[in-house]
Amino acid sequence: MIWFDLVTPKSVLFFYPFIKEMHSRGEKTLVTAREGSGYTEVVDLLKLYNIEFFNRGEFGGSNLGDKLKASIHRQLLLMEFIEEHDIKKLICLCSVDANRVAFGLKIPIVNFYDIPLSDYRSDFKKALPQARLTLPLSNKAFRPYMVPQEIFERFSLESDQIFSYEFLDVIAWLHNFKADKNIYTSMLKEYGCDISKKTIIIREEEYKASYVDKKYPILYEGLKELSEILDANFIIIPRYEPEYLEELFPFAKVLTQKVIIQHLLAFCDLFIGGGGTINSEACYFGTPTISTRSFVSHYDKMLLDEGLMKKVDTKSELIKTSLEIISRRQDENILKKQKLNIKELVDEVLK
C-alpha cells in the first residue's frame, strides 16, 4: 500500500493524478490529512475531488508552541494508524509529520518539493523548515527543473537520489483542465457580482505558515484604496477564517464555499496573490498576475523573468501595477507548452 499524506491544498491537487494512475495499475493507496479550527481547505478539497481519506491530527495555527504540540500529537496518531497497515512507501510534498513517522518506522520516503528556500539564489539561511526536516530523510526527492540540483544535494542527498521533472507543479492538475466561461459567470452571479464589470481575484499570503515571518500589510492597505479607484468586482479567496475578511473588506465578496477556483482564475481581469501555487495557476491561464509575496522563490523568479507575473513591495506599487496590467492577458505562454508524463513519473516513484 502506498501512503500519501496530504496536508496542503496544493498536495491534494498535485497528487490527484498520481493516485488515479496508481489505482489504474491496481496499486492500493492510503491517504491521510489534517484540519483544524479555521483551516478546512484540505479536507474540503479531498471531498470535492472524491478522494477517500483518513483525518489524523490538526493544523496547529499561527502560535509556534501550538504548532509544535499539534505536530508531536499528530506524529503519535499517524504512527499508531500507520502501524495497522502494510505500507510500502510514503509519498508527499515534504510533510514533516509523515516524514518523521515513516523514517522512524523504516518506510521508504519519496518527497516532491518546489520551494526548498524562500530565496531564488542559494542562501541556505533561508531554507524552509519543512525542507530541513524532511529532504535529508528522503530515499528519493523530486525537484522541478528551475530549482538547481546542487540545492537539493546540500540537503545531504546524493545526486542519484534526486530526480527532476520538466514542468511547473501546477501543470500536474491544469494540463487536462478545461476552463469554462459559463461556470465563471455563474459563480460571479451567485456572489452577487455585476458581470459587466472587471473582476479582480485576491488571495492572502499564508501568514500562519512557518516560512512566513509575519502578516505583511501591503495587500490589506492597498485593496481599499484600489476599490475606490476601480469600479470592479473584488473577490477574495480566504486561506483561513472568512469572517474577518468580510469585516475588513465590505466592498468585496469573500468565497465561503469550496469551489473549483480555477474557473475564476482563468477568466478574471486581474489576480493579486500573496501565495505561490495559486499565483502560478493564474499565470498558466495568462491572467495578469501581481505577487505580494514577502519573498521570491525559484519558480517565482521564473514567472517574473518570463513576464507572466509582476512583483510589488509597497501599497503604491500595488495600485500603480494593478492599473497598468489589468485585462492585459498573455494566453500564449511558456507554461502552456509544458507537459506532464504521469506514467513515467509514477514508474520512477514506484521503483
Image (cartoon, rainbow, N blue to C red):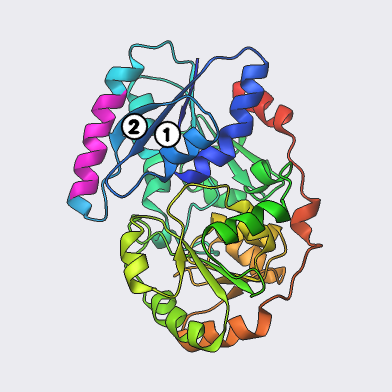
When the figure is inspected, residue 73 is found, relative to residue 267, above or below; the finding is above
**Is residue 273 located in the magenta-colored stretch of the structure?**
no
> Which residue matches tag 1?
137
The image quadrant that residue 199 belongs to is bottom right
| Residue at 46%, 71% in the rendered image | 252
The quadrant of the picture occupied by the C terminus is top right
When the figure is inspected, residue 181 is found, relative to residue 9, above or below; the finding is below
- Give neighbour class at mark 1: few <14, some 14-19, many 20+ (Cα, 10 Å): many
| Residue at 62%, 18% in the rendered image | 23
Q: Amino acid at mark 1?
A: Leu
Q: Of circles 1 and 2, which is in front?
A: 2
Q: Secondary structure at mark 1?
A: helix
Q: Nearer the viewer, residue 330 or 131?
A: 330
Q: Amino acid at mark 2?
A: Arg
> Which residue matches tag 2?
100
Q: Nearer the viewer, residue 154 or 18?
A: 18
| Residue at 67%, 18% in the rendered image | 24
Contact between labelled residues 2 and 1, with CB atoms less than 8 Å apart: yes
| Residue 152, image x, y percentages | 53, 46
